[in-house]
Amino acid sequence: MTDIPKIVYDRLRVPPPKDAALAGTHPEMELLTAFMEQALWPSGRESILGHLVLCEECREIVALAMPAAEIFDGRLPAQEQLGQAPVREPVREEEEDQQVSIPIATKRNRWFGFARPNLGWAALAAGVAVVASMLVLHPLQQKQTMPPTSNQTVAANVPLATDSQSAAKSQQLSEDSNRQASPPKGSLPSRERHVQGAADTLVADNRYPREESLIARKPASPIEKAKPALQNDEMQATSASAAKAFKWKISAGVLERSFDSGRSWQIDLRADHPLLCYASHGQDIWVGGQAGTLLHSNDDGLTWAQVRASDDDSLSADVTRIDLRNTDVANGSDVVTEIVVSTGTGEVWNSIDGGNTWNRQ
Amino acid sequence: MPIENSSRSTQFDSQSSTLVALYERSCAALYGISSEQFAAIVDEIVRKNFPPNAHAAEKATFCASLHLEELAVARACAAGNERAWQDFISRYRQKLHRMALHITRDATHAGELADSLFADLYGVNLRDGVRTSKLLSYTGRGSLEGWLRTVMAQEFINRYRKQKNTVSLEEQTDEGAQFAAPVLNSADAPDQRLEAATDEALAELSSEDRFTLAAYYLDGRTLAEVARMLGLHESSVSRRLDRVATALRRRILAGLRARGMSHAQAGEALETDVRDLRLNLRSRLTQDSDAKTFPEGKDKARDARDCGNG
């Protein structure tokens, strides 16, 4: 590391008189937050940086308010919101490498909405170009390489491809927000699975600490992990634990998914009632929510099925915890043999046949 | 959905469908916020951020990028909506404590800090007899959780400063960090030309470069911390620091020669300084680089200056 001359140090510390006004005008806390979350437009970011250079106190606030790597909640660096990701030098560097994997990545990204890039403007443009060329030149090939799913999903996802693509091309947030607000009835966009009706917001967060303990992770700087993890995720369906960390989370009553180890998140599943908890193992994900909501996916979140624990709606309390148990560890198997669902009212339900039948304990 | 007061919210007259979509997405109805009230809130925020003649599409994009749902919760809480408070508490109460612990690194103070902030948010404080909540100042530009952390960090710094008020003032004048240039012995006073050339060179850097320098060298943050603040790789930060330091040296030398120094003189003017600073950095690097509490930071700066004078 090159040192800086002491004179530089001195002159850095003492703002020149002409900058006194800028030094004395502290930005709103919100702007500092937006700065930290990389949510400022370039001009806004410039002016915040300009102040931060001169103001030790605000730099201190930023340093203190940065989330610790361990409780990184995936808002850094790029937001999933279009129009907000400023182009930054290192993201560009990464993207050059990642372009190699994009042709494979688009297969995944199509389902979950390439319209919500987590790679920034440059990657978006590059990715759109690649996607466009792929879809235009090899439409048949695309269909054949789709993962084996039910007919319904296959049909639904083809229109989604163009949907995402056009959304990505135009990069219009209003389009995006409309999609989110009222997903097309009848189709089953995997981007955000909307199970019957509008979603309630809220009440999920006591799951947060559980999430941390459930997932064993070694938090190396999540930013560094992003690149290799992205390739892992895209290329291998069954991810290693490195990719499992920062993959799923419950936030504000919906299930969110990250494809880049927590750098950015996309909504994956909403239901009638707020979702409260989840448990995953390999490609299996179980999600529980208020009012007995129980959903299951066995293809890593691509498709979802509602799970009815009983015919008579007797599971109607809030599902607050799901445990996946392997009672067969001794034999070296890595399969979930029991699913245990707990409710806020203290009920415990379990299934030992993969969720087909349930018993209340 | 017709909006009666749309004449006031001129931003969305022609795009009321946008507003409807935003309103739906925010789920504000859940918290007893009508679409008119919501429109007024959004309107106020847009006004704060855009000149009146700004392009409508730009404003629409901006609005859609806001954390609408969190904005709705925050404003509903500020208005005293019970449902909103239930949600806020279940989502953030525990987090507040965790944040406080992270910031204060001290369990007892963490509790105080979290509770005090919560009281502020709840609107325990009266202003002109009116209960007012800090949540009113949240406008959805960053995440609510991030905002809470930032506000809490600010609160922590203010509190700490208040406690050490007299000492910190003395420290400040001592170091001259804020009020005057540091007092140096005449023998150590840098050449005016050196100062001028350095100021020139610094002014040519981008804000981000200067911020990186300040965070790393002045505040003593680690590469990882600086990287997180800027949303970069550690390695990028490291490369940038190298690049900037090299460029600075080059430009200062050029500036000095332009001011009449010979190549040798210019080199010497810089070389001596570098040796001094290396000493400082080494001592700083061996310390805990968590420059959190104020005395630590001030001590480092003071040490640096003392070493320079010594």
Image (cartoon, helix red, strand yellow):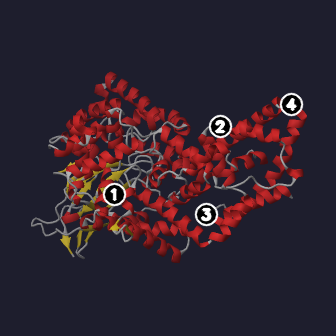
Say which element carries label 2: loop
Q: Position of residue A317 (x, y in %)?
A: 19, 69
Amino acid type at image mark 1: Ser
- Chain identity of mark 1: A
The reply to whether the C-beta atoms of the residues labelled 1 and 4 are less than 8 Å apart is no
Q: Give the quarter of the figure containing the N terminus of chain B.
A: top left
Please rate how many residues cluster around mark 1, counting C-alpha atoms within 10 Å: few if below 14, some from 14 to 19, many from 20. many
B286 lies left or right of A75: right
Question: On residue B292, which mark appears?
Answer: 3
Which comes sooner in the sequence, label 4 or label 3? 4
To the question of a shared chain for discs 1 and 2, the answer is no
- Between discs 2 and 4, the one toward the N terminus: 2
Q: Position of residue B96 (x, y in %)?
A: 43, 67
Q: Callout 4: helix, strand or loop?
A: loop
Instruction: Work out whether residue A309 or residue B254 is closer to the camera in this orientation and state it.
Output: B254
Please identify, in this view, whether the residue under mark 3 or under mark 2 is nearer the observer. Answer: 2
Q: Which residue shows up at 23% across the image and 60% down it? A: B31
Kindly identify the amino acid type of the residue bearing the numbered disc 2: Leu
Distance Cα–Cα, label 1 vs label 2: 40 Å
Q: CA distance from mark 3 to mark 2?
A: 27 Å
Marks 2 and 4, Cα distance to the nearest angstrom?
A: 23 Å
The residue that label 4 is drawn on is: B260
Q: Is residue A338 visible?
A: no
In this rendering, the answer to whether A72 lies above or below B191 is: below
Secondary structure found at label 3: loop
Amino acid beneath label 4? Gly
Residue at image mark 2: B205
Q: Is residue B230 above or below residue A294?
A: above
| Labels 1, 2: front one | 2
Q: Chain of mark 3?
A: B
Residue at which label 1 appears: A251
Mark 4 crowdedness (10 Å alpha carbons): few <14, some 14-19, many ≥20: few
